Image (cartoon, helix red, strand yellow):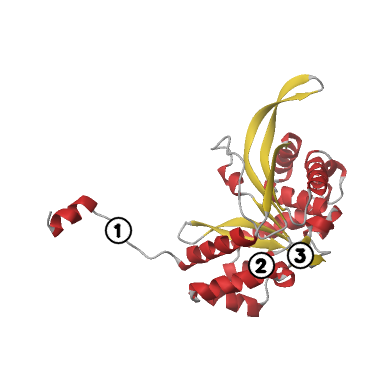
Amino acid sequence: MDKKGKLDLIGKYSKKEVPRVAQVVDDYLTIARKINSTVWGMSYIDVTDARKLIREHYKKTGYNISFTAFLITCYSRAVEKFKYPVNTFHRRMKYYYTFEDVDVQTNIERTLPSGIKKPLNYTIRKANTKTLKEINDEIQAAKQTKPEGVSTHKQKTLGIMKIFPKFPRFLRRIIIYIIFRNPLIRKRLLGTVGLTAVGMLAKEGIRGFGHGIFITPHTMSIAVAGIENRQMVIDGKPVIRETIAITLAMDHRIIDGGPATRFGTEFFDIVENQYKEADWCFKSL
């Protein structure tokens, strides 16, 4: 077969360079897989009452409450009660660094002038001291702000982050490795805990989005899937309730089964019940 015949077997194709941002993500995941000891816990949370309050508040006032903001508010209050081991990083398994501030890294979606929607990491600093309204307003403002304005890092750090993707791959991976190994740098750049709500972007269009299995640089991180109607038994009667699938990703070197279970129980109870009488939640609106 001649050269032309071999090319015909391949057919037409296109070739383009992988974006530098995607290369950085690959570097991050490669290093994370090597040093992480992640275990996952999966469950469902009943959010019927909370969603109802959000809808009713919007009808009365026109003020839109992000459900992600509600979850982050509850999440940070649960983490505050378990600063050790949840809000803790280790250094070479010799030292534990437990932080007072609960800095929640999450993802927001911005619409660019071109109309393209772009996900962006954003860290809510001292989330455990902020009300639902403060966190909701902060997230909404971040969606409208230029990327460099969204970041909560200092200007010097911003300059480094802009040129970082242009570094050679081996150098990028060394830097990422150093960040992961140093609790203070990791806290400054990545916050102390994570909450990713990619499944929530499905809104009402996709049901049964399922649980997320993911790698995280945090000791504790939560993935939130889409909202789904599920049959539950309440007071001995089957009812249909709105639920979300929750995945807790934990560094097993720091968090054992007992503390993980207690934290999960507390977080679920805050989302389903405790928020109703809390001054930091709907009463702050």
Q: Secondary structure at mark 1?
A: loop
Crowding near pointer 1: few (<14 within 10 Å), some, many (20+)? Answer: few
Q: Earlier in the sequence, mark 1 or mark 3?
A: 1
**How far is disc 1 from disc 3 in space, using C-alphas?**
47 Å
In the image, is 217 to the left or to the right of 204? right
Cα–Cα span, label 2 and label 3? 13 Å
The residue carrying pointer 3 sits among few (fewer than 14), some (14 to 19) or many (20 or more) residues within 10 Å by Cα, namely few
Which element carries disc 2, helix, strand or loop? helix
Q: Helix or strand or loop: what does disc 3 sit on? A: loop
Q: Position of residue 116 (x, y in %)?
A: 47, 56
- Is residue 152 visible in the rendered image? The answer is no
Which three-letter amino acid code belongs to the residue tagged 2? Phe
Report the disc number at residue 93.
Answer: 3
For disc 2, the marked residue is 180
Extreme residue toward the top, this view: 237
Q: Quadrant of the N terminus?
A: bottom left
Q: Position of residue 233 (x, y in %)?
A: 75, 23
Identify whether 2 is placed above or below 228: below
Foreground pick, 84 / 69 = 84
Q: Amino acid at mark 3?
A: Met
Q: In the rendered view, does 247 fall on the left or right side of 208?
A: right
